[in-house]
Image (spheres, rainbow, N blue to C red):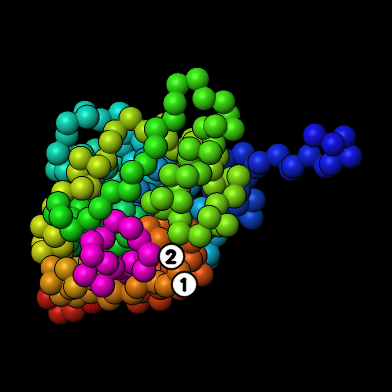
């Protein structure tokens, strides 16, 4: 390197207080689940995707915390939360999260809302089906949980043994391009570092629950309004996002669906302003019940 070339700025620590210095953030521990809490207002639970952590919401937390009390856990088997059996089914997996919500992440009998990304959307719909009297609205962002034949999985690369830091970074960057972020210019060094961290902390392979028909059965039991936000360039839905939207409408009649242009699978990261607007508008209208007690 030329001695006169300035060194790149060091990456900020991948820690909420460092990335969001203007927010008061608390770390919660309940039933083995680690969650971050920030913001004020109605409670909105944010559930990240597979091979992820709370960092999947890095471009949304600041805006959403101005309107909601956010509870952002690392899902079981990922991030800093507890391990789960590798062959667990969705009901068994969901019970780990229920134990944490009942064990201190939420107040007793507190109504709340949930937004989930990818595999987190599968868990979101499951939660709504389990607790119809408490979940007042859900958001599904690039949801998984569809029947084989209705999705495609890009050919992601594995990090070779003995890879250097540069080589490992290159693999993660390429995998992000293939599946998560449509415009490579949006993938900076921090994004790659977050992906490396998430990958290294993932013990549970959510694809065994996310790449099968696990979403629709829950949606058919869901009583609250549903928001869906889909990336137009998401490579997973087959044949396209419009077909995915039609499938969602058939299984969730109380659906408000948006297809976001110029966005791939990680739609909340790639188009945060549009996604934040949809989430704020949708969830700000939730919480009221009709005469029968159903959320409207």
Question: Which residue lies under the disc numbered 2?
Answer: 263
Q: Position of residue 245 (x, y in %)?
A: 23, 71
Q: Which residues are magenta?
A: 226-243
Residue under the image location 47 percent in, 45 percent down: 174
Q: Quadrant of the C terminus?
A: bottom left
Q: CA distance from mark 2 to mark 1?
A: 10 Å
Report whether 62 appears left or right of 70: right
Residue reaching furthest bottom? 291
Report whether 229 appears left or right of 252: right
Residue under the image location 19 percent in, 73 percent down: 246
In terms of image quadrants, where is residue 33?
A: top left
Binning the other alpha carbons within 10 Å of mark 2 as few (below 14), some (14 to 19) or many (20 upward) gives many
Question: Which residue lies under the disc numbered 1?
Answer: 274
Asked whether disc 2 touches disc 1, contact meaning CB atoms under 8 Å apart, the reply is: yes
Report whether 130 appears left or right of 259: left
- Residue 75 tag number: none
Q: Position of residue 101 (x, y in %)?
A: 29, 45
- The reply to whether residue 173 is visible in this rendering is yes
Q: Position of residue 117 (x, y in %)?
A: 34, 55
Q: Position of residue 55 (x, y in %)?
A: 48, 47
Does dot 1 land on a helix, a strand or a loop? helix
Q: Nearer the viewer, residue 67 or 203?
A: 203
Residue 107 is covered by the magenta coloring: no
- The reply to whether residue 112 is visible in this rendering is no
Report whether 159 appears left or right of 12: left
């Amino acid at each position: 390197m030329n001695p006169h070339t300035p060194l790149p700025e060091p990456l900020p620590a991948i820690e909420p207080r460092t990335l969001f210095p203007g927010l008061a953030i608390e770390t919660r521990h309940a039933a083995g689940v680690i969650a971050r809490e920030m913001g004020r207002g109605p409670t909105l639970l944010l559930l990240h995707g597979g091979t992820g952590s709370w960092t999947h919401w890095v471009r949304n937390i600041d805006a959403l915390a101005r309107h909601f009390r956010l509870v952002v856990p690392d899902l079981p088997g990922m991030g800093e939360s507890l391990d789960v059996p590798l062959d667990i089914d969705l009901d068994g997996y969901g019970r780990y999260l229920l134990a944490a919500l009942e064990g201190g992440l939420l107040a007793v009998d507190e109504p709340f809302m949930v937004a989930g990304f990818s595999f987190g959307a599968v868990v979101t719909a499951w939660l709504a089906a389990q607790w119809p009297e408490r979940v007042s609205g859900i958001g599904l962002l690039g949801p998984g949980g569809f029947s084989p034949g209705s999705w495609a999985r890009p050919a992601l690369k594995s990090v070779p043994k003995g890879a250097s830091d540069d080589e490992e970074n290159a693999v993660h960057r390429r995998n992000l391009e293939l599946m998560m972020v449509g415009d490579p210019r949006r993938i900076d060094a921090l994004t790659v570092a977050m992906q490396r961290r998430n990958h290294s902390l993932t013990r549970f392979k959510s694809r065994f629950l996310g790449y099968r028909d696990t979403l629709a059965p829950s949606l058919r039991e869901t009583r609250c309004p549903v928001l869906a936000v889909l990336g137009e360039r998401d490579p997973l839905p087959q044949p396209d996002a419009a077909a995915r939207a039609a499938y969602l409408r058939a299984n969730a009649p109380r659906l408000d669906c948006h297809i976001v242009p110029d966005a791939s699978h990680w739609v909340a990261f790639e188009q945060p302003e549009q996604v934040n607007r949809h989430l704020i508008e949708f969830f700000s209208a939730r919480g009221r019940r009709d005469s029968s007690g159903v959320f409207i």
